[in-house]
Amino acid sequence: MLALTRKKGESLVINNNIEVTVLEIRGDQVKIGISAPKEVPIYRKEVYLQIQEENKAVLNADGLEALKNLM
């Protein structure tokens, strides 16, 4: 993991086309802005993990159904 120090208004660039900017710092919360191409999905980690779990559940259910159809 790369750890960087940024101040309000400062940015970092990822892969030449994604810019992350510190918009506001209030107490222990930091508000960030992300500029990226529309085709780049951006999720909060807890939402991303939930999507991954739902995808696994669907794959498992489809896999069981496919096995039932074979028999």
Image: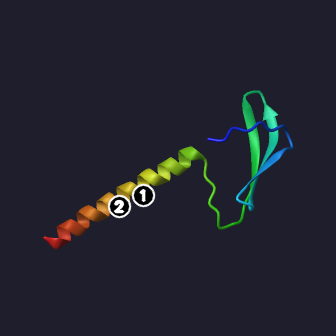
Decide if residue 62 is on the left or right side of residue 42: left
Going 36% across and 60% down the picture, which residue do you hit? 58
Gap between marks 1 and 2 measured at Cα = 6 Å
Residue lying at the far bottom of the rendered structure: 70
On screen, residue 47 versus residue 37, left or right, reads left
Q: Residues within 10 Å of mark 2 (few under 14, many from 20)?
A: few
Can you say which quadrant of the picture contains the N terminus? top right
Residue at 84% in and 37% down: 7
Q: How packed is label 1: few (under 14 Cα within 10 Å), some, or many (20 or more)?
A: few
Residue 68: % across, % down: 18, 67
Q: Could you tell me the amino acid type at mark 2?
A: Leu
Element at label 1 = helix
Name the spot of residue 17 as percent of width and height, x first: 74, 62
Q: State the residue at coordinates (42%, 54%).
A: 54
Out of 16 and 43, give the one closest to the viewer.
16
Towards the viewer: 54 or 14: 14
Q: Which residue is mark 2?
A: 59
Is 71 drawn above or below residue 20 in the view shown?
below
Residue furthest out toward the top: 27
| SS category of the residue bearing label 2 | helix
For the C terminus, the image quarter is bottom left
The residue identified by callout 1 is: 55
How far across and down, in percent of the image, does residue 60 sit?
31, 58
Q: Is residue 63 above or below residue 43?
A: below
**As shown in the figure, which amino acid type bears the numbered disc 1?**
Asn
| Residue 35, position as x, y percentages in the image | 76, 57
Q: Are marks 1 and 2 in contact (CB under 8 Å)?
A: yes
Count the numbered circles shown: 2
In this image, 55 relative to 30: left or right? left
Mark number for residue 22? none
Please report the residue visible at 75 percent of the width from the left and 37 percent of the height from the top.
30
